[in-house]
Amino acid sequence: MYEYSKVELDSIVRFLDGILIIDPTYSDSVKTAIKKTMNRNYKHETLDKISQDTQNLRDSLYLLDKHVNNYMGIVFERIEMFNYNYLKNRDGTITLTNPDPTSKSDLLHIHDQKYYSLASCGPDVKFGSADYVVDEYIKKHLMNEESHGFIDITGYLKAEDYCEKTGFKTLNKSQNAKVLAAIREFGYKPAIPSEISRMEFHRIFYYYMNYLTTGTLPSEIEVSDLSDLISSIDKNELTASDFKHKICVDQSSLMVSEICDLTNEIRNTNNDSSIKREETTQTTDKYKKTTIINEPKKKNTNLGSKKPFWHTPTPQNVVKGVLIASISLAAVGSSVYIAKNPELRKKFIKYLPDLKSPQRIENTLPCVSDIIPAVEIAIENIAEKVKSFDADKISSFRAAFDMFCSGLITKAEFYEIANSIAEKTGKDLSKYLRLLVNFFGDKNAAELLKD
């Protein structure tokens, strides 16, 4: 079972609260898929309206008054939609919740081809009591020859818990008797497992409720136990009227065609965060080891017989201390200045050994040596980026945008590279920047959009 990181959870709660808009180019494909699974004979005008309606979870908040489980079921459908797009889909397939609430399929899949798109019917997504899930499983899945799959979020009908003789481990005798009778008559069809656990679904739901009323993202909350968060939002006390007045966050909008870009962006952000955590851990361990090694030396030092130079404030020693501090500051300042001036990048590599010279006096001046590793890492990181900098090798808006944000390329260079990528891939730069602004609130992207 997959467990989302705090970085991913931040994106999920924003995704849940976003207004989902079906692109006009996908409208015909979506209507075709709706026709295959609809339980009512819709008129053409009604189908047009359904396929053009925006999807907004806030529209269903009225269910919180008396039907909390129904509202949770709708939220869980969108969570499963995110699971498909983030964890399962490949090759441009996009999953969305079915705009038709009475349909036999809760999810639809859009297969975006180069010159056209087509939509196929996805599975039913069910949440609720064991009796409800069993009845829906029999009626919607076992008895339905045209079933497109059945996802049991509650986990009552896991394939690994099924036995031909006794039924499912998680069901009682009467429930298993009902299921086994249906299986003998219609045949066994396993349910589709979700990528995340029932507990993860609930965790995300309560993070979402908390986000609506406090504007606090999951990464900003320290929760040692899920029960701490659940106890702060008692679902038995939820009412739509209360929530309408308590909602304190602005909604973002998201086109269906932007979902692939969004999930890629979340993956990149999550990977970057993981790398930084790993680097931080390694750096911390390195400093710990250094401290342990140096500690005995400090204890054994006889300051009476051999004083470090900063304990003797002669003019020569003062000048030496100022010189060392200046070299360290120059190393930091030079790396930042050169990173923002493209014409100096090539020359920068040549002088790296000189900029890193303060490490020679690491044992002499501990107060400066504490910042040397940070300076060295900053210089090496910039050096690596400079070495690998090749406009022709940058193949994504993300890579170009990261280089712009870190100061490795200018705004003019960014546009030159990004426009070249747009010509090669057919992707829209403005659309990508709008996604960063609307969904992530990125200030750098907003600055670029002004131009």
Image: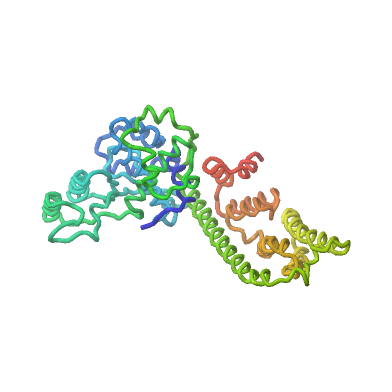
> Is residue 79 toward the left or the right of residue 343 in the image?
left
The residue that appears at 39% across and 28% down in the rendered structure is 242
Q: Residue furthest right?
A: 315
Whether residue 330 is visible, yes or no, is yes
Relative to the observer, which residue lies in front, 78 or 103?
78
The residue that appears at 76% across and 63% down in the rendered structure is 348
Relative to the observer, which residue lies in front, 186 or 233?
233
- In the displayed structure, 80 sits above or below 50; it is below
The location of residue 402, given as percent across then percent down, is 61, 53
Count of residue discs: 0
Query: What colour scheme has been applied to the protein in the rendered image?
Result: rainbow
Whether residue 29 is visible, yes or no, is no
Specify the quadrant of the image occupied by residue 408: bottom right
Relative to the observer, which residue lies in front, 370 or 241?
370
Looking at the figure, which quarter contains the N terminus?
bottom left
The location of residue 14, given as percent across then percent down, is 46, 42
> Is residue 216 toward the left or the right of residue 358 in the image?
left
The location of residue 248, given as percent across then percent down, is 48, 32
The location of residue 180, given as percent across then percent down, is 13, 54
The residue that appears at 33% across and 44% down in the rendered structure is 33
Specify the quadrant of the image occupied by residue 368: bottom right
Looking at the figure, which quarter contains the C terminus?
top right
